[in-house]
Amino acid sequence: MSTLLVKNLQALVSCDGQDRVYQGVNLYCVDGLIRSIGPEAPAADRVIDGTGLLCYPGLVNTHHHLYQVFSRNLPQVQNLELFDWLTALYQVWKGLNEDTVRLSSLVGMGELMKNGCTTVFDHHYVFPQGAGDLIGAQWAAAEQLGVRMHFSRGSMDRSQKDGGLPPDAVVQTVDEILRDSIDLIDRWQDNSFQSMHRIALAPCSPFSVSADLLRESARLARAYHVRLHTHLCETLDEERFTLETTGLRPLAYMETLGWVGSDVWYAHGIHFNDEELQLLAQTGTGVCHCPISNMKLSSGIARIPEMLSLGVPVGLGVDGSASNDGSNLLEELRVCYLLHRLNSSDRAPSGYDLLKLATIGSARLLGREDEIGSLEVGKCADFFLVDARRLELVGACRDPKSVLATVGLKGPVDYTVVNGRVTVDKGRLVSADEEKLVWKAEREVNRYLSAL
């Protein structure tokens, strides 16, 4: 039995159904689960002094492309919009191998964890021929760091010769994709409570995959009880593409292929109209909001206030590091708050609304709201701690529920705990030598980008 006690917390923001904030409590965890929140202070294997600390549920990242960490801030693509940006970067991404994916995953997930993230969903859809076991490489990184991981078997079968964007080197046939999807589900899907790894099926986007692949992926996912994910309504270029090739708007097209329901969530969802928002709400189809990526690629502003008022399931994601240039959900929280204040004024979500978007809202998109996303007895011990006594937070913590969005956090959190295990201790990764990792990663970046 492993135990962890955090004593005398200044405040614990639960993000539970009653929006409870506890003052001066202890948090006791046994075997990765929360046993008590209150005055109890049993003996424990590890004790953290919570004096002056704020405690929050671990952030849940519901859309990322970890392999893109090694292609960020490239001058060749900085001022491009999505289609041109993708076309240029596919020439880099076709050089992926296991080392690139493992090291970029360590760097990206390490940054996420240092900023309070405890669960990572990654949308990996680039599988170059002969690249090796890329999902296995991601798990090696996740296991080393101790983060809770949701993989995806992404896919593309429509290359440039078929009217798509990717080169032939990174697309596969529908049969190859489905066969590998079954193998990966058998290997990685763990439906047990407290599971550290699960997998979703995630064809890339309507403009890089065929209708057959989308339809068969949906059938396969439901036969094997895994979730479905893809990009949708990210740009007006995508909307024009589906109108020209199918005669339908993107969501109507996806609906004909079985892609609506509580087991489906879309990344971005910027260009939904009123009727489409109603359909999302009625069917429980989710949306991952990626504000910084949407801003950098000039894609637009998602209608998050309307989605929340209608009851559309909404979570938060950082998207690929090459379309964000960082892997920091705390930064995403503050930018999200400011963006919607600017765009929607008093209809914008509050700072606390956005914290819930990144915690229990994101957990719902992954189908895990009963396990993660809030701090309650019996749920997974996934949380992070912030010292309210740091210079940047003087006078800011009278409202601990909103401070992470309204004021923001400059610098890493003090502790991140995943499944009852301390994974970030005083702002540093516990199970990775950060200096050595930086050296190895930079060496791989130089090799990987040599094609430029």
Image: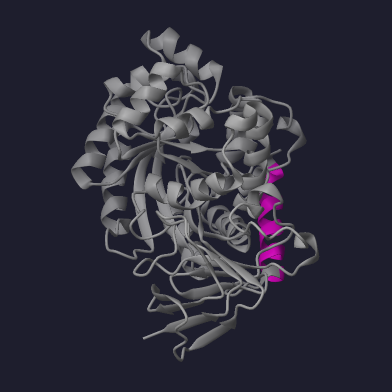
Image quarter in which the C terminus is found: top right
- Looking at this view, name the residue that lies furthest to the right: 391
Residues shaded magenta: 435-450
Image quarter in which the N terminus is found: bottom left
* Image height of 289 relative to 359, above or below: above
Number of marks in picture: 0
Give the x, y percent position of residue 378. 34, 69
Q: Is residue 131 left or right of residue 347?
A: left
Residue drawn at (56%, 38%) of the image = 349
Membership of 300 in magenta stretch: no
The way the protein has been coloured in the rendering is one colour
- Looking at this view, name the residue that lies furthest to the left: 223
Give the x, y percent position of residue 14. 48, 61
Residue 204 in sight here: no
Q: Is residue 305 left or right of residue 220?
A: right
User: Where, by quadrant of the figure, is residue 230 drawn?
Assistant: top left
Membership of 442 in magenta stretch: yes
* Image height of 318 relative to 279, above or below: below
Give the x, y percent position of residue 412. 68, 63
Q: Nearer the viewer, residue 450 or 419?
A: 419
Residue 379 in sight here: yes
Q: Is residue 178 left or right of residue 323?
A: left
Give the prevailing secondary structure in the magenta stretch: helix
* Image height of 349 relative to 243, above or below: below
Give the x, y percent position of residue 132. 45, 52
